[in-house]
């Protein structure tokens, strides 16, 4: 079993997951960070039923994160909500336990992937960015 760091005895709280996500965001290079001031981060237990239905996901543990909003460069429309990144605590914790990946690395991976949607990045670009901000 891998070392789970300070979270080896209890499941991390939403606040602890949020702190790891904010740390990952703070490691992003300046050109990216400068475009994140209006992105709102949420940590929830699971995605709600409507989101899962809309994404055709049957298992609530099947979604660890979600980006909603217009990517940078798309024209803003009247009535747009701010862009959001949702992290889903329980699916993240299950993946953490199942894979043995350090929690900070897992959170970084999911955050970079979701933020990648904000910038319209390809999967390859997301992997490069993730390597740049790895804990």
Image (tube, helix red, strand yellow):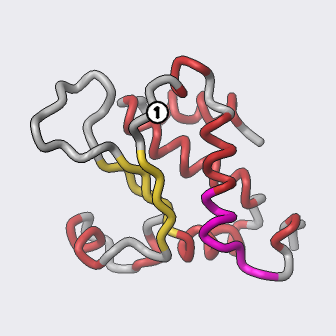
Image quarter of residue 18? bottom right
Query: Can you give x and y, in whole percent of width and height, for residue 39 in the image?
Result: 41, 41
The secondary structure type at the circle numbered 1 is loop
Asked if the stretch drawn in magenta spans residue 16, the answer is: yes
Residues drawn in magenta:
10-18
Q: Residue furthest left?
A: 78
* Residue tagged 1: 36
Quadrant for the C terminus, please.
Answer: top right
Q: Residue furthest top?
A: 31
Query: Can you give x and y, in whole percent of width and height, for residue 132 in the image?
Result: 68, 28
Give the residue displayed 44% in from the left and 26% down from the top.
Answer: 35
Q: Is residue 21 above or below residue 96?
A: above
Give the residue displayed 45% in from the left and 46% down from the top.
Answer: 114
Quadrant for the N terminus, please.
Answer: bottom right
Give the residue displayed 64% in from the left and 66% down from the top.
Answer: 15
For label 1, count other residues whose C-alpha is less than 10 Å away and answer few (under 14), some (14-19) or many (20+).
some
Horizontal arrangement in the rendering, residue 124 relative to residue 56 (left or right): right
Q: Is residue 34 above or below residue 38?
A: above
Give the residue displayed 68% in from the left and 68% down from the top.
Answer: 96
Q: Is residue 108 above or below residue 54?
A: above
Query: Can you give x and y, in whole percent of width and height, for residue 54 in the image?
Result: 21, 66
Horizontal arrangement in the rendering, residue 94 relative to residue 65 (left or right): right
Report the number of numbered marks.
Answer: 1
Work out whether residue 68 or residue 1 is closer to the camera in this orientation and state it.
Answer: 68
Query: Can you give x and y, in whole percent of width and height, for residue 47 in the image?
Result: 38, 71
Asked if the stretch drawn in magenta spans residue 27, the answer is: no
């Amino acid at each position: 079993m891998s070392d789970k760091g300070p979270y080896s005895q209890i499941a991390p709280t939403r606040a602890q997951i949020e702190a790891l996500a904010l740390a990952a965001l703070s490691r992003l290079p300046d050109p990216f960070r400068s475009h994140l001031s209006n992105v709102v981060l949420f940590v929830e237990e699971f995605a709600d039923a409507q989101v899962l239905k809309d994404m055709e996901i049957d298992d609530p543990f099947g979604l660890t994160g979600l980006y909603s909003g217009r990517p940078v460069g798309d024209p803003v429309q009247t009535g747009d909500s701010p862009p959001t990144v949702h992290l889903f605590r329980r699916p993240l914790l299950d993946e953490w336990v199942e894979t043995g990946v350090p929690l900070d690395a897992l959170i970084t991976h999911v955050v970079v992937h979701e933020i990648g949607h904000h910038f319209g990045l390809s999967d390859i670009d997301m992997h490069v960015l993730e390597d740049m901000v790895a804990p």
